[in-house]
Image: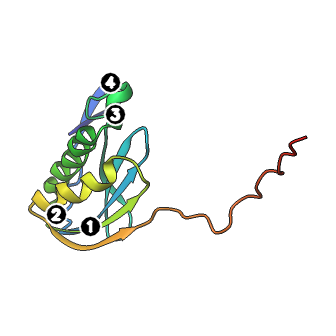
Amino acid sequence: MRKTTRGNRTINKKKAERLVTRGRLYVNATFNSTLATITDDKGNTLCWSSTGESGFSGGRKSTPFAATVAIENALTKSHAFGMNEIDVYIKGIGPGRDVALNVLRTAKLKVGMIVDRTPIPHNGTRSRKAKHNR
Protein backbone atom coordinates (compact mmCIF):
# COMPACT_ATOMS: atom_id res chain seq x y z
CA MET A 1 0.00 0.00 0.00
CA ARG A 2 1.35 3.40 -1.00
CA LYS A 3 0.52 6.70 0.66
CA THR A 4 0.34 9.90 -1.33
CA THR A 5 -0.47 13.34 -0.05
CA ARG A 6 -2.63 15.90 -1.79
CA GLY A 7 -2.71 19.16 -0.01
CA ASN A 8 -3.37 18.36 3.62
CA ARG A 9 -5.09 14.98 3.15
CA THR A 10 -3.51 11.55 2.70
CA ILE A 11 -4.76 9.04 0.16
CA ASN A 12 -3.89 5.34 0.37
CA LYS A 13 -3.31 3.71 -3.00
CA LYS A 14 -3.21 -0.05 -3.20
CA LYS A 15 -0.71 -1.42 -5.70
CA ALA A 16 -2.51 -3.47 -8.35
CA GLU A 17 -1.73 -7.15 -7.84
CA ARG A 18 -1.22 -9.11 -11.03
CA LEU A 19 -1.49 -12.81 -11.64
CA VAL A 20 1.34 -13.94 -13.92
CA THR A 21 1.66 -17.70 -14.24
CA ARG A 22 4.40 -17.72 -16.89
CA GLY A 23 7.50 -15.54 -17.01
CA ARG A 24 11.19 -15.20 -17.73
CA LEU A 25 14.25 -15.23 -15.48
CA TYR A 26 17.23 -13.21 -16.73
CA VAL A 27 20.52 -13.98 -14.93
CA ASN A 28 23.43 -11.63 -15.54
CA ALA A 29 26.52 -13.26 -14.01
CA THR A 30 29.55 -10.95 -14.01
CA PHE A 31 32.85 -11.48 -12.22
CA ASN A 32 31.86 -8.93 -9.56
CA SER A 33 28.16 -9.61 -8.98
CA THR A 34 25.08 -11.55 -10.08
CA LEU A 35 21.79 -9.94 -11.07
CA ALA A 36 18.50 -11.82 -11.41
CA THR A 37 15.46 -10.17 -13.04
CA ILE A 38 12.04 -11.79 -13.43
CA THR A 39 9.74 -10.48 -16.15
CA ASP A 40 6.43 -11.45 -17.69
CA ASP A 41 6.27 -12.85 -21.24
CA LYS A 42 6.24 -9.36 -22.76
CA GLY A 43 9.42 -8.35 -20.90
CA ASN A 44 7.89 -6.09 -18.23
CA THR A 45 9.90 -6.38 -15.02
CA LEU A 46 8.02 -7.90 -12.10
CA CYS A 47 10.81 -8.24 -9.53
CA TRP A 48 14.59 -8.43 -9.30
CA SER A 49 17.38 -9.29 -6.91
CA SER A 50 21.15 -8.96 -6.80
CA THR A 51 23.96 -10.10 -4.57
CA GLY A 52 24.30 -6.56 -3.18
CA GLU A 53 20.59 -6.35 -2.37
CA SER A 54 20.85 -9.73 -0.65
CA GLY A 55 23.26 -8.28 1.90
CA PHE A 56 26.67 -9.13 0.45
CA SER A 57 29.36 -6.52 -0.12
CA GLY A 58 32.87 -6.34 -1.46
CA GLY A 59 34.52 -9.59 -2.45
CA ARG A 60 31.69 -11.68 -1.01
CA LYS A 61 29.36 -10.47 -3.79
CA SER A 62 31.31 -12.50 -6.34
CA THR A 63 30.85 -15.88 -4.62
CA PRO A 64 28.60 -18.72 -5.75
CA PHE A 65 26.78 -18.67 -2.39
CA ALA A 66 25.85 -14.99 -2.85
CA ALA A 67 24.53 -15.80 -6.32
CA THR A 68 22.45 -18.64 -4.86
CA VAL A 69 20.86 -16.33 -2.29
CA ALA A 70 20.15 -13.62 -4.90
CA ILE A 71 18.45 -16.01 -7.33
CA GLU A 72 16.44 -17.64 -4.53
CA ASN A 73 15.28 -14.18 -3.39
CA ALA A 74 14.12 -13.33 -6.92
CA LEU A 75 12.23 -16.63 -7.23
CA THR A 76 10.62 -16.10 -3.81
CA LYS A 77 9.41 -12.67 -4.92
CA SER A 78 7.98 -14.19 -8.10
CA HIS A 79 5.74 -16.54 -6.08
CA ALA A 80 3.72 -13.48 -5.02
CA PHE A 81 2.66 -13.14 -8.68
CA GLY A 82 1.57 -16.79 -8.86
CA MET A 83 4.38 -17.82 -11.20
CA ASN A 84 4.76 -21.54 -11.84
CA GLU A 85 6.43 -21.75 -15.28
CA ILE A 86 9.61 -19.92 -16.28
CA ASP A 87 12.06 -19.54 -19.17
CA VAL A 88 15.69 -18.89 -18.24
CA TYR A 89 18.10 -16.55 -20.05
CA ILE A 90 21.70 -16.65 -18.77
CA LYS A 91 24.30 -14.04 -19.70
CA GLY A 92 27.92 -13.79 -18.58
CA ILE A 93 30.65 -16.05 -17.28
CA GLY A 94 30.71 -15.28 -13.56
CA PRO A 95 30.26 -17.64 -10.62
CA GLY A 96 26.47 -17.24 -10.64
CA ARG A 97 26.16 -18.90 -14.03
CA ASP A 98 26.16 -22.55 -12.95
CA VAL A 99 24.51 -21.79 -9.63
CA ALA A 100 21.40 -20.49 -11.41
CA LEU A 101 20.73 -23.91 -12.89
CA ASN A 102 21.24 -25.63 -9.52
CA VAL A 103 18.76 -23.27 -7.84
CA LEU A 104 16.19 -23.89 -10.57
CA ARG A 105 16.58 -27.63 -10.11
CA THR A 106 15.52 -27.33 -6.46
CA ALA A 107 12.79 -24.70 -7.09
CA LYS A 108 9.25 -25.89 -7.66
CA LEU A 109 8.92 -24.28 -11.08
CA LYS A 110 8.50 -25.73 -14.55
CA VAL A 111 11.44 -24.68 -16.72
CA GLY A 112 10.37 -24.15 -20.32
CA MET A 113 13.76 -23.45 -21.90
CA ILE A 114 17.28 -22.39 -20.98
CA VAL A 115 19.02 -19.92 -23.29
CA ASP A 116 22.66 -18.82 -23.16
CA ARG A 117 22.85 -15.13 -24.13
CA THR A 118 26.58 -14.65 -23.43
CA PRO A 119 28.02 -12.24 -26.02
CA ILE A 120 30.72 -13.82 -28.18
CA PRO A 121 33.00 -11.56 -30.26
CA HIS A 122 32.99 -12.24 -34.01
CA ASN A 123 36.55 -11.21 -34.89
CA GLY A 124 36.71 -8.30 -32.42
CA THR A 125 39.17 -5.42 -32.48
CA ARG A 126 42.47 -5.39 -34.32
CA SER A 127 45.39 -6.93 -32.40
CA ARG A 128 48.47 -4.97 -31.36
CA LYS A 129 51.44 -4.44 -33.62
CA ALA A 130 54.11 -7.12 -33.17
CA LYS A 131 57.13 -6.06 -31.07
CA HIS A 132 60.55 -6.18 -32.73
CA ASN A 133 63.40 -7.71 -30.73
CA ARG A 134 66.72 -6.11 -31.68
Disc 3 + disc 1, Cβ < 8 Å: no
Residue 23 shows which numbered tag? 1
In three-dimensional space, the C-alpha distance between marks 2 and 4, rounded to whole angstroms, equals: 40 Å
Residue 21 appears at what percent x and percent y?
17, 69
In this view, 61 is above or below 78: above
| Residue nearest the observer in this picture, 96 or 42 | 96
Mark sitting on residue 8: 4
**Amino acid at the residue labelled 3:** Lys
- Amino acid identity at mark 1: Gly
Q: Earlier in the sequence, mark 3 or mark 1?
A: 1
Q: Which residue is mark 3?
A: 61
The answer to which of marks 2 and 3 sits earlier in the sequence is: 3
Which secondary structure lies at badge 3? helix
- The answer to whether the residue labelled 2 contacts the one labelled 1, judged by CB atoms less than 8 Å apart, is yes
Kindly identify which numbered label has been placed on residue 83. Answer: 2
Q: Residue furthest front?
A: 134
Asked whether disc 2 touches disc 3, contact meaning CB atoms under 8 Å apart, the reply is no
